[in-house]
Image: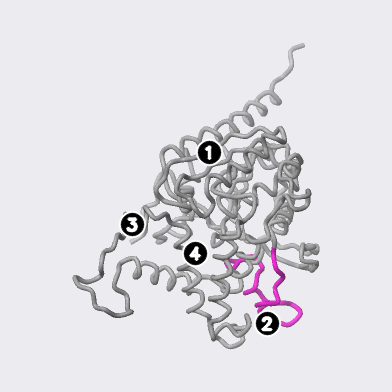
Amino acid sequence: MPNAIPEDSVGIVEPQIARFNTPLELTCGRKLDRYELIYETYGTLNADRSNAVLICHALSGTHHAAGYHSPDDRKPGWWDAYIGPGKCIDTNRFYVVCLNNLGGCSGSTGPTSINPDSGKTFGPDFPVMTVTDWVNSQACLADYLNIDIWAAVVGGSLGGMQALQWSILYPNRLLNAVVIAAAPRLSAQNIAFNEVARQAIMSDQEFYDGRYADHDTIPRHGLRLARMVGHITYLSEHSMGDKFGRDLRSDKINFGYDVEFQVESYLRYQGDTFSESFDANTYLLMTKALDYFDPAASFGGDLSKALAQAKSNFLLVSFSTDWRFAPARSEEIVNALTEAGRHVSYACVESPHGHDAFLIPNERYEAIFSAFMGRVADKLEHANKKQGEVPCI
């Protein structure tokens, strides 16, 4: 039976593909001569093309941020709670664009794509990406869509890092940056978590130095472990305890090493699901991009000097139980923006959900997000109204 599409949904959406034949120079010193970006759009672009909003996804995100791909779809896009008619990013007022980043495995050119030089999948030969490379490719997509200036660039986690990088690299091409549950660079602990996840994948006997496609296999075991490690860091101790506690799957302890606690079952399920849907080389690439992100590095380590390049207004949001990107990390960005003389609004939201809180409905978070985006829309509409006024003679 078809799924009933909610009234506040963007409805059925269809992905589109943009093809580029102009070489993209990459931070690693290599280039992509040709590449494709898959994206979705929601809402209507206004006459002067000024109401466009770019959504940047996190590590395992995709271009499918809102709506449904068919009436039978049971699950909407990953940020459907925040994108749609009357929602925080109101598609009655904004034209919203979300893409799958280069190096992804959901339709944009990446390790699973065919390498034109070999006729086989790129696999480990695909270039290592950085946040700067993604932002540069997103700027190419903006050109493709004839969007000169984004009303806002918005993202959570790794997506928030991209929004921050946009404000530095292309200060004249965005009016507002929304940086949610992010950090100005990874801590040593976060890099360590990523390295454990990568080692789990690379030590899998089915990995074959990244050429598992040539062997018609997948490093499932390594991907499962990587996802389990990552998933633990996305949740808070409170949310895990509240959801699972020390509940057993059966009514007794079996004194063995099979699954006994509900939390073990949950993590294995998450790992199994992820290992069947996400590419291992892409996971390595995405976590490395996270590790490398440090916009202050090009400015002598001074984040305020880096952010002095920006011209946009900023909204930063952190979450009280997010220990992966703790509120103190967002406050580093806020302090640097303040020192650089930029206009910034900041809120730390109480939530029991840890790092995943930026994906989950929360009344205060929604109120803050909606108020900021509402002001953005109001300013655009006021500016358009003034431009359309006939001067008195």
Q: Nearer the viewer, mark 4 or mark 1?
A: 4
Tell me the distance, in whole angstroms, between the alpha carbons under discs 4 and 1: 36 Å
| In this rendering, position of residue 109 left or right of residue 20 | left
Residue 233 vs residue 377, the one in the foreground: 233
Sequence-first tag of 4 and 2:
2
Q: Earlier in the sequence, mark 2 or mark 3?
A: 2
> Which residue is at the front of the view, 333 or 163?
333
- For discs 3 and 4, the disc positioned in front in the rendered view: 3
Q: CA distance from mark 1 to mark 3?
A: 39 Å
Examine the image and state in which quarter residue 186 appears. bottom right
Say if mark 4 contacts mark 2, CB within 8 Å.
no
Write down the residue under mark 4: 230
Under mark 3, the amino acid is: Gly
Q: Amino acid at mark 4?
A: Gly
| Residue labelled with disc 2 | 120
What stretch of residues is rendered in magenta? Answer: 104-129
Indicate which label's residue lies in the foreground, 2 or 1.
2
> Is residue 56 found left or right of 174 in the rendered image?
left
- Does dot 3 land on a helix, a strand or a loop? helix
| Whole-percent x, y for residue 251 in the image | 19, 70
Q: Which is more N-terminal, label 1 or label 4? A: 1
Give the labeled residue for mark 3: 241
Q: Quadrant of residue 265?
A: bottom left
The residue under the point 65% across, 69% down is 110
Label 2 element class: loop
Label 2 crowd bin: few (<14), some (14–19), many (20+), radius 10 Å: few
Mark 1: amino acid: Asn
Residue 336, how many percent across, how many down?
67, 40
Residue at which label 1 appears: 92
SS at circle 4 = helix
The answer to whether 214 is drawn above or below residue 193 in the figure is: below
Which residue is nearer to you in this view: 219 or 118?
Answer: 219
